Amino acid sequence: MSIAVVGAGSWGTAMAHALAGEGHDVSLWARDPALAEQVAATRENARYLPGIRLHPAARVSGDLAVVLDGAEVAVLTVPTAGLRGVATACVPHLDAGCAVVSAAKGFEGATSRRTSEVLTEVLGPGSASRVAVISGPNIAPEIARGLPAATVVASADRDTAARVRDRLTGTQLRVYSNDDLIGVEYGGALKNVMAIAAGVADGVGAGDNGKAALITRGIAEMARLGVRAGARPLTFAGLTGLGDLVVTCTSPLSRNRRLGEAIGRGMTLAEAQAGTYMIAEGVHTAPVAAKLAAQLGVEMPIVGEVCAVLFEDKPIRDALASLMRRGARDELQEFGLVE
């Protein structure tokens, strides 16, 4: 089974390492030729995944044609902002039957499109059946260390979702399939915004009660927007909703939570982003989520306050007060799932 992992960030490197350990024929592509050479020579991605020795069977290259040659599954682990460009570069080298999987968790900034929509546009007419997404509570360093995890693969085509699921499932990563493509993508994207909010709460010392409330109300917002966009409610109770939200809001390894915590402790957004190669997708997702909420007529107060803190210099205490002072209402109606 030949699998191409396109993108040598922390998640791509961890995935290549784990899949090679399961006996798959795996190739990893790094955009930066110098990084590809360094990882191939030292067997360590010191920039993105320090301390992990890459499985000896995983090949590393800066040449897309080499990495994609004969691949049955291509997993694109690049940030959302770069997905369209990288996917376009992949097209000439993809076999006709290759399943193309997005591991990015966000919306394209200029178009507000989901990642599967971006891939379908790039691959062309009739390609939707070979496009899939992967999303779930998958902190890269833990995957690389061989700790147990689960994730979900979604596609508009059930056979494609099942094929990718069966290929990627192993002894350390349990993969489920789901045909609710919208729900899986909305869950994966929106949880990053909530993780920034959770990190801010940690940074200002809002306490465990406050954080639990934020996580719970966060999934309510995620479900409201996702369902209005066409998702199924129960998807948000699964791995890409509740599962990913919990780990991203609580893990010290979560880059979105860490960024929020730094801001909660007094850093500006620019200061929090400086000095790291890692991209906190929630920063780019927040304004797109606010735009989609306005278009669909959905209340998303947490998203609104995150945007205000990140981009309008709203004091954090004022943002928390705005959330706490919202008018009283019925909890289940607030989820937007009952009348």
Image: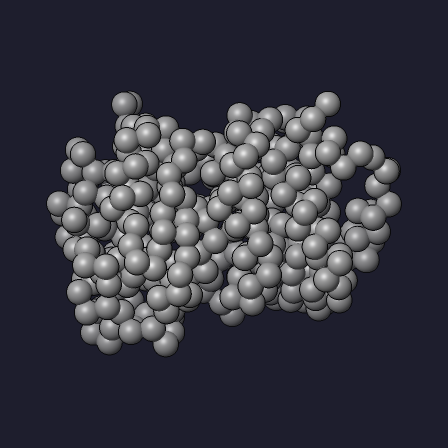
- Where residue 36 appears, as percent x and y from the top left, is 25, 65
Could you tell me which residue is drawn at 61 percent across and 33 percent down? 225
Could you tell me which residue is drawn at 38 percent across and 43 percent down? 176
Relative placement, left or right, of 215 versus 13 is: right
- Where residue 201 appears, as percent x and y from the top left, is 71, 60
- Where residue 73 appears, as percent x and y from the top left, is 23, 44
Pick the front one: 130 or 78: 130
Could you tell me which residue is drawn at 15 percent across and 52 percent down? 66
Vertical placement of residue 49 versus 119, above or below: below
Pick the front one: 245 or 37: 245
Tell me the quadrant of the picture where the C terminus can be found.
Answer: top right
Residue 207 seen by the camera: yes
Residue 65 seen by the camera: no
Place residue 301 in its image quadrant: top right
Relative placement, left or right, of 37 versus 102 is: left
Relative placement, left or right, of 95 versus 330 is: left
Could you tell me which residue is drawn at 64 percent across and 33 percent down? 224
Pick the front one: 158 or 70: 158
Pick the front one: 109 or 304: 304
